[in-house]
Image: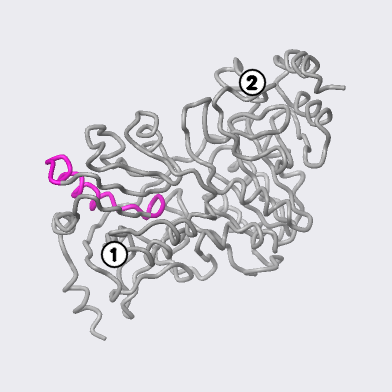
Amino acid sequence: MNYQAQYEAKRMSAEAVAAEVQSGWLIGMDSSAGHTPTLISAVAARAKNSELTDVKVHTLLDVYPMEFFADNSLLGRLTNVAWFSGGGSRRAVNGGYGDVIPNYYRDIPKYIRAMYDYDAFFVSVSPMDKHGYFSLATVCSYSPAMMEKSRRIYLEVNDHQPRAVCGGQIHISQVTGLIEVSQPLPVMPAAKIDAVSETIGGLIAERIADGSCIQLGIGAIPDAVGAALKAKHDLGIHTELFTDSMVELIACGAVNNSKKQIHRLQSVTTFAYGSQRIYDYIDDNPGIALLPVDYVNDPNVICRNDNMISINAALEVDLWGQVCAESVGTRHMSGTGGQVDYVRGACQSKGGKSFIAFSSTAKGDTISKIKSTLTPGAVITTSKNDVDYIVTEYGVAHLRGEPLSKRAAQLIAIAHPNFRDELRFEAKKRGILI
């Protein structure tokens, strides 16, 4: 029962933890601010000195500049394998010195339990409470599954991490070793809401009723939707990622979670990433529940909330309505993440709607994001059978249940005017428009 004595017995230096790592280990981490850059740097130092080979580290959405994202000489010594890529893992994959696991976010815990045995789980946590528990802070995601399948658990105890009272916990008795750090959490710069994003946000907000339950992603368009929803009432939150725009909606009173069918009066998410304001909001707040992703992103759970609204992004869409959100041609960008989870969950919800939103062009209006056919090599994220609404600054196309000819006509109508004639020509040439 003397938890502080256990704590002191397990306190180590980063170098001491790294010294326990052996060649051939598989190390797991969860997402974003749950990563452990100090521990990884210590392990990387050993790998650079040729003391380690064939160590692999599973991550999701990297936000720290960890060594294996920048140093291709670590290939074969310390290699990243991403469940979903951020900027560093994207560079590593495209550079040929990183790897990626295709998946639906909701399925990662299932894969971990069925397929992987981890030699160690690394995670950043808040300081221990008087009962011997550490909060997983901003991330729950697949951490419970990794803890079950890991032989060892090493902590970075960071006094900047918030304590999520309705989130994942680790007890000191489960811990192999820990280090102490005092490091501000990574923050995401606020997206710039331009006129195009503002227009798209307004088009989507018009179609969201009071009392709806929302999921928003990252970026200017979701932020613009959030801004446009401030005049709404009794909104709820059930989302994969908890964002700054959601804190804004709670602060202004638009979100109170009073109309939800499950987790009423609580915002539900599986991880949070954004500004310091988010981390401050999570701290000691029973109004936000950070729960495992195999529950939060399960379409059969998502749809239990009526009027579920899902808003996600895309890089390009073809005239069938196939959505690519994770590659530019053959160039890897991110991953499927939870887009399909929420498209399906929202469409199964009573009164629910799913929106895929993006500006109509790229590279100074020289490339249309609505295409006759997807760029060769493009990865399909959301299928033509799942897609619901597509939105650009030129309007809204409803595709679900519609025939191909009507889908194509609607998509051409919301494409940039400079490309409509070309798209219409290609559609008629292929016999799509009848």
**Above or below 68: residue 305:** below
- The numbered disc on residue 418 is none
Q: Amino acid at mark 2?
A: Ser
Is residue 78 shown left or right of residue 233?
Answer: left
Q: Residue at x 71, y 36 (%)?
A: 390
Is residue 12 shown left or right of residue 189?
Answer: left
Tell how many labels. Answer: 2
**Quadrant (top left, top right, bottom left, bottom right) of the N terminus:** bottom left
Q: Nearer the viewer, residue 6 or 117?
A: 117
**Quadrant (top left, top right, bottom left, bottom right) of the C terminus:** top right
Quadrant of the rendered image containing residue 264: bottom right
Is residue 427 shown left or right of residue 152?
Answer: right
Q: Main secondary structure of the magenta part?
A: helix
Horizontal and vertical percent position of residue 299: 64, 57
In this figure, which residue is indicated by the disc labeled 1? 153
Quadrant of the rendered image containing residue 314: top right
Binning the other alpha carbons within 10 Å of mark 1 as few (below 14), some (14 to 19) or many (20 upward) gives: many
- The numbered disc on residue 368 is 2
Horizontal and vertical percent position of residue 23: 20, 50
CA separation, marks 1 and 2? 48 Å
Horizontal and vertical percent position of residue 368: 64, 20
Q: Residue at x 48, y 40 (%)?
A: 190
Q: Secondary structure at mark 2?
A: strand
Q: Is residue 252 magenta?
A: no
For the record, the magenta segment spans 30-51
Q: Residue at x 71, y 39 (%)?
A: 202
Which of labels 1 and 2 is toward the front?
1
Q: Amino acid at mark 1?
A: Ile
Q: Secondary structure at mark 1?
A: strand
Horizontal and vertical percent position of residue 216: 60, 48
Binning the other alpha carbons within 10 Å of mark 2 as few (below 14), some (14 to 19) or many (20 upward) gives: many
Disc nearer the start of the sequence (1/2)? 1
